[in-house]
Image (cartoon, rainbow, N blue to C red):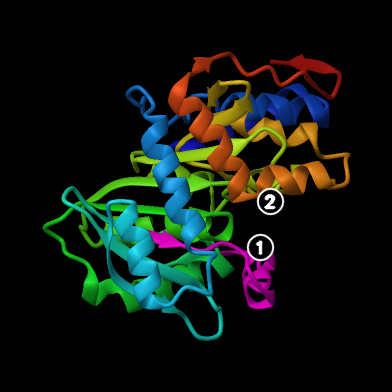
Amino acid sequence: MLISSKLARCFSYRRLTMLPRHLFIIFCLFNLLFLLPKAYAQINFKQLSQFAKLSSDTYIETLTKSELGDTLKQQGQQLIHQAVLPNSDVLYFLSQNKQAQTLAIRGTANLNNVILDLTVSLQFDQALGVQLHTGFAQAAQQVLQDVRPYLDKDIPLAITGHSLGGAIAVVLAMYLEAEGHPIESVVTFGQPKVTNLSGAKKFADMPLLRIVTEQDIVPLVPPISPLQIQNLDIFWHMGKEIILLGKHQFSVTSGIKSALRATKFSNQLPSEANLRAHQISRYIILLDALSTKEEEVPYRMEINLFGISID
């Protein structure tokens, strides 16, 4: 209701002032500046690197169950369950250590996964009462049904994933949170958007950290469009965004600044640099570097929106 009322005031303001379309859009976006997630404590890059390595493990299809178990054991984890789900080909595993269970979900790895990525329509989810990305929601429901018998509600749960896996991780956390399952943390890498403004607001307290690299364009899709604004149906990220900049530097953004990063790439075709920036191996390299030395710097967008400089 808060989001709808804010946007309703935007439309009312435009009717009263006849504000030009492009200035009206900017006005509405800045009215959303206060839809920010809660603050987080100091960032533990060593722990984030461990999550990234678990996400990377999901891509190693050649591992047998025993080999995956050995790999996870070296990372202080015990394998509880693993599965490749029919139709969607989503792969995930559940592991456990003394502190928590961890659910890691694979990203885009084949044609069936791509179909999930491209199913970009929003559909109302009755169980959650929010709009969700159709493809991600279907995959998350599959994972939920398969993993539910192996989850221990007495143990905190961490969920992680890269790309498509990160998107499924967020939606899955929404379902589990609604069921009363304790979610300790959700850590995603290069994750696309999964819901709209209303959905992001409803789950604003989710303990979500979105890790991105500066040139990775996957977290910027689907982009904001004027038509979505008029329909009150804007795809929107929740959680705090940590931008890995290289040279032991990082920035933290959220809300409107995170959303407007997409305008830096809106007129560019994806390049080889964007592809490399999306690879989970790149995330691991940057996080390992930050584990030894870190410097937080303000994120400089250096963009102009309709002739207005925004930083």
Q: Is residue 261 magenta?
A: no
Q: Quadrant of residue 19?
A: top right
Note whether 4 is above or below 35 in the view shown: below
What mark, if any, has residue 221 been given in the picture? none
CB-based contact (under 8 Å), mark 1 and mark 2? yes
Q: Residue at x 42, y 54 (%)?
A: 54
Q: Residue at x 53, y 44 (%)?
A: 197
What residue sits right under mark 2 in the picture? 222
Q: Quadrant of the N terminus?
A: top left
The amino acid sitting under disc 2 is: Pro
Note whether 107 is above or below 203 in the view shown: below
Left or right: residue 239 versus residue 158 is right
Q: Position of residue 221 (x, y in %)?
A: 68, 49
- Give the mark, 1 or 2, whose residue is nearer the N terminus: 1
Q: Quadrant of residue 224?
A: top right
Gap between marks 1 and 2 measured at Cα: 8 Å
What residue sits right under mark 1 in the picture? 120
The part of the chain drawn in magenta is 103-123
The amino acid sitting under disc 1 is: Val
Q: Is residue 110 magenta?
A: yes
Q: Quadrant of residue 65?
A: bottom left
